[in-house]
Image (cartoon, coloured by chain):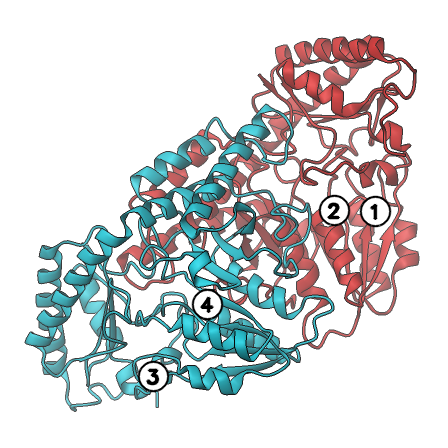
Chain colours: A red, B cyan
Amino acid sequence: MIYLDHAATTPVREEVRAAMAPTLEQTFGNPSSGHAAGRAARALVDEARDRLAGVLNCRPREIVFTGGGSEADNLALRGVMTREGAVGRHLVISAVEHEAVLETARDLSARGFEVSILPVDSSGLVDPADLARALRRDTALVSVMMANNEVGTIQPLAELLELTRSHSDALFHTDATQALGKLSLDMGALGVDLLTISAHKVYGPKGVGALFVRQGTRLDAQITGGGQERTRRSGTENVPGIVGLGMAAMLAERERELEMARLGSLSQRLTQEILRELPEARPTGAEPPRRLPNFCTIAFPGIEGELLLLRLDRAGVLASAGSACASGSQAPSHVMLAMGLSPELAAAHLRLTLGRSTTEDEVDQTAAIVAREVRALRERSPVQGNPLGTKPT
Amino acid sequence: MIYLDHAATTPVREEVRAAMAPTLEQTFGNPSSGHAAGRAARALVDEARDRLAGVLNCRPREIVFTGGGSEADNLALRGVMTREGAVGRHLVISAVEHEAVLETARDLSARGFEVSILPVDSSGLVDPADLARALRRDTALVSVMMANNEVGTIQPLAELLELTRSHSDALFHTDATQALGKLSLDMGALGVDLLTISAHKVYGPKGVGALFVRQGTRLDAQITGGGQERTRRSGTENVPGIVGLGMAAMLAERERELEMARLGSLSQRLTQEILRELPEARPTGAEPPRRLPNFCTIAFPGIEGELLLLRLDRAGVLASAGSACASGSQAPSHVMLAMGLSPELAAAHLRLTLGRSTTEDEVDQTAAIVAREVRALRERSPVQGNPLGTKPT
């Protein structure tokens, strides 16, 4: 099995499992309990917070642990937009945001908030001039992701943030779920107010994420109760998950530069080999360095992507069309459409995302298998360009 | 170490750890991925959902997995009260709800919703007549917990539900976080619309819970995004947590009757032994069968509860004053005050909650240690009734 869907999720690495193990055995206390068992659990949560603060170069108290990246995105958007006493009711997002931002913006829009959606160019990039035009006196929040989850395009965050600061009083949130472990997330250098991360994209466990909330940033809790996480997210702490996130993020950051150099070469090799075999294939997204090093995304004109994925799966290559997060959706990807791909080409898209287990040998095998399966699908196609006549229009 | 704080949290039991292990190793896929790795993870989530549905005697699709009990409570309250097109803006809760319900009701109240809070008697019970008086034409939701987390009092849920049905169109939610594994949670017999449970109270992992949502019940998602959990709770599924919850709930239900009979005798023995040594001690809460069998709660007039807990901790007995969930709070417990205890007596409260590891020997040792430490504190007390003069007034 060749797993090339690391943007969907990653296996928990051994060091993370080892760090989590005590929390599932002897260190089982509730961190809110004052006794010995509680204090031992609290110490592990504190240590994990310190580790994550080290990765983000922020204060430990600026970290809010959540049940995952989607919850963190929701907390950022809902927490800022619906906070008591807020005046601005205008939200700006990009057209290629993850569903956790996009759908939340839609929900807020249905509840009377105003949302502006920034277009992207054919490589998925937001034009800062579009943000400058969108910003208003009552803009409360701008949310533009750091790197896209379907094509890996890295947004010009520094420019977008500078514009936001100079043109408005809005806060700035970025979803860095795909960026953690791939790009530097130095909160001192980056300057954003809010940033989302998730553990399971960096060899940590599912069910845990975090929102960085810059000191002084006001946002309303979306889960209220016992007052955990300095009242910003109530509920007994997910000690195993938090410990796993702390360890996974620390290791990902430590290995980041070397590993990204390695994956950058491998993904380039993969793209080149596929293009050599299938010259008509169309790479999507941006060129390096504006693309995450572990992303290889490519569209095959005239091919039904879902069928290609099925054949690859049977051949032992695990990949995806785009996001795994829009579960069961048959609609063409909003990211592809925003980049100007036709619905047909959007449905012919393959996302291969590399990770720690990926080897040169896997890359070479994958290129050969992809070429073979694309050719096999073409040979079956009665009509070039719309092989099965089953695409939604 | 004698752990008598099972209402705060429980250790993960071995069978649960064993069930979770594959999800942290080979079965690491994203359940939303269509390929082999995704399908394997999806199968585990489905199996866990089926197991939990078996425990609750409900349809698998009526279960929404969440990041814990607090999130489930928030989803029930916010999801019903703020749903689009809702007419009723009136919410009824009891005065002894968990903070996840109480604080959420407060937050809703601050946002323009109307909240009625039902009083309780000295044993912590809601009087159905009070509910009958509180219900209004615009009552959208009644939320009364099944069993209290500080004193274990079991509410007359059947009567409260019947009144709600006959007097209003309101939905009925119950927080059954403490009840799971102790009382029967048959959704056919119980008839509630919404019910909250949590894994870490029944020897499952922290960071995962569930909300039962009866088919046809409309509530708005509080975490939007990729549309997981039938759009009611987005975010990549916490596969390890969900698998752990399914296994933990199944085992808890299977062992429930025998284990509760055992713990009922042990807690009765513990109470009797403490009272024999300290006749002035005042048991709190209700008598069996209106009390959870694993709860032994008792107040020691004239004693500073926090000091007692410290001494017990040093002596190896891990207990609590009431809830672990109101972390770091110095205020007297809202539950004790609602039951009519004076702030002094509320601050002299000890909660001993028994569990799977509890033995008769531990119970006897604990009674002796509690008696010894209470006496030691009394001997230090310069003034009977207000020993240290440090209680907040």
**Residue A304 x/y as whole percent:** 81, 22
Q: What's the residue type where badge 3 is placed? A: Met
Report which residue position mark 2 lands on.
A145
Q: Nearer the viewer, residue B120 or B385?
A: B120
Report which residue position mark 4 lands on.
A226
**Alpha carbon of mark 2 to alpha carbon of mark 3: how far?**
50 Å
Q: What's the residue type where badge 1 is placed? A: Ala
**Alpha carbon of mark 4 to alpha carbon of mark 1: how far?**
36 Å
**Residue A40 x/y as whole percent:** 32, 53
Give the number of the disc on residue A95: 1
Is residue B312 toward the left or the right of residue B216 in the image? Answer: left
Q: What's the residue type where badge 2 is placed? A: Met
Which image quadrant is residue A62 in? Answer: bottom right
- Circles 2 and 3 on the same chain: no
Q: Is residue A382 above or below residue B226?
A: above
Structural crowding at the residue carrying mark 2, measured as other residues with C-alpha within 10 Å and reported as few (<14), some (14–19) or many (≥20): many
Structural crowding at the residue carrying mark 3, measured as other residues with C-alpha within 10 Å and reported as few (<14), some (14–19) or many (≥20): many
Report which residue position mark 3 lands on.
B339
